[in-house]
Amino acid sequence: MLQQVQSQHFQALLSKTGTLRLPDGSELPIHIDSLEETPRSRMPKSERMPFSVEFNSLNPTEFVDGLCALALPELGQVQAIFVSRVPAMGRDPGVGYFYIAFN
């Protein structure tokens, strides 16, 4: 299912809220902040344009990284998405900031 995920699936979620299902089964409300396509990272013969998604939690969280699930338009609940936490770097330290890369 991960191979089917394209940047346009996240396009509809930009600036909206959603729910990230964490590895322990708990749910974390999130806000999708940005989407960036990275054409220079494209692998030869790969059909998918590489892209990344950045989002933040709406609540404080101790979650750092792991395989999560997220509902995407047209695909439904997508499992095994690796989510990484990134430093707040001057932003609100009361929430978590996260990154997903699709190559």
Image (cartoon, helix red, strand yellow):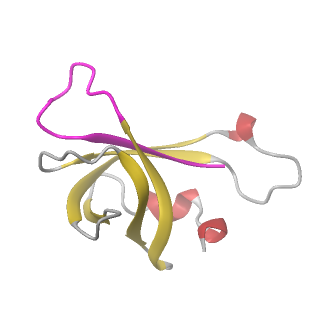
Horizontal side, residue 11 vs residue 55: left or right: right
Horizontal side, residue 29 vs residue 100: left or right: left
Q: Position of residue 31 (x, y in %)?
A: 25, 52
Q: State the residue at coordinates (69%, 51%).
A: 49
Q: Position of residue 34 (x, y in %)?
A: 40, 43
Residue 8: which quarter of the image? bottom right
Horizontal side, residue 33 vs residue 96: left or right: right
Question: Residue 7 or 63: which is nearer the viewer?
Answer: 63
The relative height of residue 100 versus residue 20 in the rendered view (above or below) is above
Residue reaching furthest to the right: 45
State the predominant SS element of the stretch in magenta: loop
Q: Position of residue 62 (x, y in %)?
A: 20, 45
Residue 28: which quarter of the image? bottom left
Q: State the residue at coordinates (28%, 71%).
A: 25
Question: Residue 83 or 29: which is nearer the viewer?
Answer: 83
Q: State the residue at coordinates (45%, 58%).
A: 11
- Give the residues in magenta: 86-103
Residue 84: which quarter of the image? top left
The relative height of residue 67 versus residue 37 in the rendered view (above or below) is below
Q: State the residue at coordinates (39%, 47%).
A: 65
Whether residue 54 is in magenta: the answer is: no
Q: Position of residue 45 (x, y in %)?
A: 88, 54
Whether residue 94 is in magenta: the answer is: yes
